[in-house]
Structure formats: C-alpha cells, structure tokens
Image (cartoon, rainbow, N blue to C red):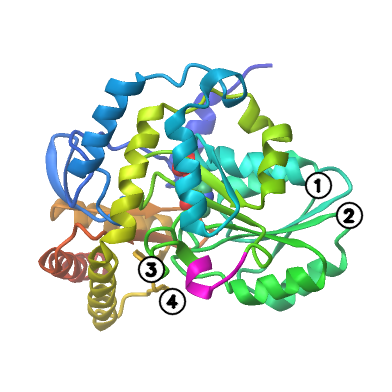
Amino acid sequence: MSFDLAARLAARQADNLYRQRPLLQSPQGPVVTVDGKAYLAFSSNDYLGLANHPKLIEALQQGAAQWGVGGGASHLVIGHSEPHHQLENALAEFTGRERVLLMGSGYMANLAVITALVGKGDTVLHDRLNHASLLDAGLLSGARFSRYLHNDLDSLKLRFKRAQGNTLLVTDGVFSMDGDLAPLPELAAQAYAHQAWLMVDDAHGFGVLGKTGAGLVEHYGLSTEDVPVLVGTLGKAFGTSGAFIAGSEALIETLIQFARPYIYTTSSPPAVACATLASLELLKSEHWRREHLQQLIAQFRQGAQTLGLNLVESPTPIQPVIVGDSGAAMAMANRLRERGILVGAIRPPTVPTGSARLRITLTAAHSSAQVQQLIEALAQSQAEVQHG
Ligand SMILES: *Cc1c(COP(=O)(O)O)cnc(C)c1O
C-alpha cells in the first residue's frame, strides 16, 4: 500500500480543477497587490470595506495593549474574557435574540450547532447548495442526512415525509456561490408545520441586508420562533474574524454544555473581539455603505446584462457570471487578470458540475468608475475567449 499523491494531483490538474493560492501582499481593498502586481480586485467578502478600516485597526491595537494577544485557554477554562462577553451581548442586541455565543470561525460554529442538536435517529435537511461546513456538520452529527433541490419547497416537502426524530432544516441565508436568497418565510412555515427547527447560516447577509444590517432575518422580519438557530460570521462584512450563533437562552446554554467544537478549542484573541465591537458600530451607523453597495450592484447587473452575460437572480454583492465549463471559466479569469482585474474562478466541487463561474463580489469600498472598468474588461475578455 502507498499513497499515490502524485497521481491524485495530476488527475486534479488534468480536470482543470487544480487550485493555487494567490499571494496577497497588501491589505484587503479594491486595489490589492498579488504576486508582485497591482490589481483591481472583485473577489473578497469584505462587503462593507471594513477589513482595513482605521477604526478597526485602532480598536485591535488598543485591545492588544489592554488584553494581550492570545486567548490563552478555552472559554470554559479561563479563556472567556471581558471583550468576548461584551461582544456577545452587543450581538444579541443587534440580532434581537436572547443570547449569542461567539465562535472562532463559521466552519466551527456550524459544526458546533448541528452536532449538538441532532444525532443518530434524528434528521437534518439541507438545501443542495448549502455551504460545505453545513454539509460536513450534518455528516459528522450522525443524523439522517437529506438534501432537497435548491430553494425548492416541493422537494423539501418530500424530504419531510421521510424525516425521523428531531428534524433540523438548514439553509444558507444568502447562498455563498450564487448570491440568491433563501425563501425564509416559507421555510419557517414548513419547519413549523413539521415541528422542525429552522437554522439559517447568514454569513453573507449580515451587514449587507436588512434595515440595520442584521441580515436576511431582519429583511424578512423573522423572530426566534421562526428561526430558532441563526449563525453569522465575522470574517465577511464585519471585516474581522470569527462567527456567532444567536438564539434562545436555552439554545446557547445547550451549546456551552454540549457543543464539542466550542468546548475543545482555545478562545479567539480578545483584541479581535474589540475590533469586531468597533466594526459593529460602523456597520449599524454607516448606512451609506449598504446604499452605495446597492447602487454598485444595480450598475453591475445592468452592464453585464447588456453584454449578454449569464447572471444569477442575485440582489446581493455576490454576482456570479456562469460560464459552465471549468476551462472556459479559467480562461475568462486569466484574460481579466491580464487586464489588471482579479476575480475568482469557482469550479467543481465547490459548485455543481457544469456551473463553473466567475464569482464577482462588490464592496462598498469600490467606486462606480471601478465597476465600469470591470464591465469594460468583461466585454473585451468575453470577445477574446469566444473568438479563441
Ligand atoms: C464563509 C462561510 C462560512 C465559514 O465561515 P468562516 O468564518 O470563514 O469559517 C460558513 N458558512 C457560509 C455560508 C460561509 O459563506
């Protein structure tokens, strides 16, 4: 027996699925330095342009001066510090939930909740396009695992018929590779009718959607009864790092007692919580970021539609251009790169086979002129790729 890694890697390359890590040599922003060159980038999840904001940097520095660098221990031992606690309270108020639990990352938050709530004999129902961390968590839980067609309520109804035990209905709020929205009121109604719980991972909705930026749940006006489990991440619109779970007092206490990915890990640096508190203030108070973002989204969609590009029905800063073939998606991304524009080419298995795409993301830090530059570069690259 041996591990034939070379063969696996070669096969990956032959399938046009080989991944490489661009080396970022500047902070996040509309213009970045990657592998020694400057690019206009449309590929980060820093939707509000806060990742490099002076107020966040200052809060992080002051936080480090006051609290040091390392979390030092797990939350249950002696790693739960004052800034973590303050941030949990602030996020509970922001989301209108009784309580919030802070986590080191969104991936871990999803593992924590799902494995703590369901197990053998229970059921977890997933939208087919849910984030990988949700799917992994479902598998790890040992619960019966079933996926329904994307945003398809009839398909979901069929899955409910075969559900057993406690049933958790799990969905992305804003779908991470498509930018479209889950029909939360309808999902909440179905969950209620089947005595199931609805869990929403709104990693891409927080900061961007809702009147105060509290995401898709705020956009639809849904309560804890409608959405008992709400997950948000801090590495996207918040511009920092980490994640949170919001819900009832009983939910959060259950997680503290039983969620292994919460219990068996060191708390995140308290200074990061200080930075997130600063970010939360900006996110709530600076409405102009959301408004400007909406203008850029409209501008982009209009320009791309004029070019005949294949867009997704997305009202969010995630604006994929569906290309189909992995090779063609790579070719488009490379042509754009030659023009000084950086966008991600997302290929299977991250997205379903045959739906390779450019994942274009807009941020409040972009200008209208930069979006115009993107549209012009897309027009030129498209013409080149089509004519070989
Ligand atoms: C990014 C993302 C995560 C993971 O969050 P991290 O904090 O980056 O680990 C989870 N769910 C969704 C939908 C995401 O987009």
Q: Which residue range is magenta in the image?
A: 217-223
Q: Are marks 2 and 1 in contact (CB under 8 Å)?
A: yes
- Residue 197, horizontal then vertical, whole percent: 74, 60
Give the residue number, with chain letter if any, for mark 4.
Answer: 313
Q: Earlier in the sequence, mark 1 or mark 3?
A: 1
Question: Which residue is drawn at the image coordinates 23% and 67% (left, top)?
Answer: 288
Give the residue number, with chain letter if any, for mark 3.
Answer: 316
Q: Earlier in the sequence, mark 2 or mark 1?
A: 1
On whether ligand 1 comes within 8 Å of the CB at mark 4, the answer is no
Q: Quadrant of residue 22?
A: top left
Q: Is residue 331 above or below residue 314?
A: above
Q: Is residue 175 above or below residue 66?
A: below
On whether ligand 1 comes within 8 Å of the CB at mark 2, the answer is no
Spatial CA span between label 1 and label 3: 32 Å
Spatial CA span between label 4 and label 3: 9 Å
Mark in the foreground, 4 or 2: 2
Spatial CA span between label 4 and label 1: 32 Å
On whether ligand 1 comes within 8 Å of the CB at mark 3, the answer is no
Please indicate whether residue 305 sits to the left or right of residue 161 in the image.
left
Q: Nearer the viewer, residue 240 or 139?
A: 240
Amino acid of disc 3:
Thr
Return the mark for residue 386.
Answer: none
Amino acid of disc 2:
Gly
Q: Residues within 10 Å of mark 1 (few under 14, many from 20)?
A: many
Q: Are marks 1 and 3 in contact (CB under 8 Å)?
A: no
Position of the C terminus, as image quadrant, is: bottom left
Q: Earlier in the sequence, mark 4 or mark 2?
A: 2
Give the residue number, with chain letter if any, for mark 2.
Answer: 165
Amino acid of disc 4:
Glu
The answer to if 335 sits in the magenta stretch is no
Give the residue number, with chain letter if any, for mark 1.
Answer: 143
